[in-house]
Image (cartoon, rainbow, N blue to C red):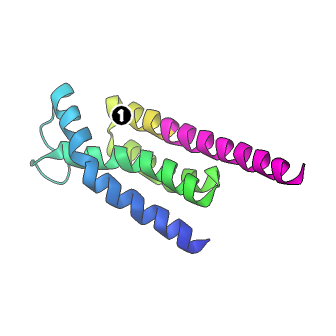
């Protein structure tokens, strides 16, 4: 179980890093950016990483471990980070929406998987 959790966490970080430019560029086009607490260069890339981590942690960790609660444990700290750094509008709402989408997709896939497993088991036995 620990290896699944570590695998989900590492995959979330890698995927967030790889796709951060997509969300970062979208944020830069739609919202005014000047600088972040890390420096004046490309603050939207950090925000893109944070938003995607909230999504991928909720989705991948919940899906890999088959426990929605573990995805929540890994996603909540990044939401708290957004609140503590003062990125309330629109960044907090975007993260919460991505978090809900990630949990929704993970829940849907796990439900479909359990339905197919039940159907397959009843076909074998009956």
Quarter placement of the N terminus? bottom right
The residue closer to the viewer here, 110 or 2, is 110
Rendered location of residue 123, percent (x, y)? 82, 48
Q: Give the residue at the far bottom of this rendering.
A: 3
Residue segment shown in magenta: 100-126
Determine whether 10 is above or below 69 in the image.
below
Q: Quadrant of residue 103?
A: top right
Asked if residue 68 can be seen in this view, the reply is yes
Q: Main secondary structure of the magenta part?
A: helix
Q: Quadrant of residue 47?
A: top left
Residue plotted at (49% across, 53% down)? 60
Give coordinates of residue 73: x percent, y percent: 56, 55
Q: Nearer the viewer, residue 63 or 16?
A: 63
Q: Is residue 73 visible?
A: no
24 on left or right of 78:
left
46 over 6 or under it: above or below: above
Vertical arrangement, residue 5 with respect to residue 75, above or below: below
- Position of 56 with respect to 72 (left or right) is left
Q: Is residue 34 magenta?
A: no
Q: Residue furthest right?
A: 126
Residue at 60% x, 60% y: name it: 65
Name the outermost residue toward the left.
41
Q: Residue at x 34, y 55 (%)?
A: 15
Q: Secondary structure at mark 1?
A: helix
Q: Is residue 21 left or right of residue 81?
A: left
Asked where in the image residue 30 lies, by quadrant, the reply is top left
Give percent across and percent down for residue 105. 54, 39
| 44 left or right, relative to 6 | left
Q: Reply yes or no: does residue 107 show up in magenta.
A: yes
**Which residue is under mark 1?**
88
Q: Residues within 10 Å of mark 1 (few under 14, many from 20)?
A: few
């Amino acid at each position: 179980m620990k290896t699944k959790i570590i695998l989900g966490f590492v995959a979330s970080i890698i995927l967030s890093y790889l796709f951060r430019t997509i969300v970062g560029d979208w944020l830069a086009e739609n919202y005014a950016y000047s600088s972040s607490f890390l420096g004046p260069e490309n603050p939207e890339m950090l925000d893109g990483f944070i938003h995607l981590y909230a999504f991928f942690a909720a989705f991948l960790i919940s899906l890999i471990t088959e426990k929605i609660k573990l995805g929540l444990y890994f996603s909540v700290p990044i939401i708290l980070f957004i609140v503590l750094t003062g990125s309330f509008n629109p960044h907090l709402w975007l993260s919460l929406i991505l978090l809900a989408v990630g949990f929704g997709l993970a829940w849907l896939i796990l439900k479909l998987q359990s339905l197919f497993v039940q159907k397959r088991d009843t076909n074998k036995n009956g």
